């Protein structure tokens, strides 16, 4: 299951809930992150600390072994996905 690191939790507490989707495009998977207030039908809801993330069914398996991280850049954030430690 997708994990959320402490820095991403802190960022999400500031910006609010996000929804992550995945879409196969050619040989690659494109991940999209959007602001959200409610999960859509079939979404998996992850809660860590004060952070909440909605995972679309298409993203659950794709991100199962990943950690959601974040890089802060002044007034905005860039989310990252890294392999979970083994």
Image (cartoon, rainbow, N blue to C red):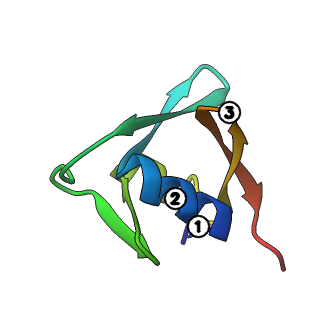
Q: How many marks?
A: 3
Q: Position of residue 81 (x, y in %)?
A: 69, 50
Q: Is residue 64 left or right of residue 35?
A: right
Asked which quadrant contains residue 36, the reply is: top left
Q: Which residue is mark 1?
A: 4
* Residue assigned mark 3: 74
Residue pointed to by mark 2: 61
Q: Is residue 50 left or right of residue 42?
A: right
Q: CA distance from mark 3 to mark 2?
A: 32 Å
Real-space Cα separation, disc 1 to disc 2, in angstroms: 15 Å
Crowd class of label 2 (few under 14; some 14 to 19; many from 20; radius 10 Å): some
Quarter holding the N terminus?
Answer: bottom right
Q: Residue at x 44, y 60 (%)?
A: 13
Residue 5 seen anywhere in this rendered image of the structure: no
Query: Which element is circle 3 on?
Result: loop
Tag nearer the camera, 3 or 2: 3
SS state under label 2: loop
Residue 83 image point, x, y percent: 78, 61
| Picture disc at residue 83 | none
């Amino acid at each position: 299951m997708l994990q959320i690191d402490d820095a991403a939790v802190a960022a999400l507490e500031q910006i609010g809930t996000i929804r992550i989707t995945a879409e196969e495009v050619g040989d690659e998977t494109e991940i999209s992150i959007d602001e959200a207030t409610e999960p859509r039908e079939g979404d998996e809801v992850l809660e860590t600390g004060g952070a909440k993330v909605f995972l679309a069914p298409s993203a659950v398996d794709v991100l199962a072994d990943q950690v959601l991280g974040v890089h802060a850049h002044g007034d905005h954030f860039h989310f990252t996905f890294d392999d979970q430690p083994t």
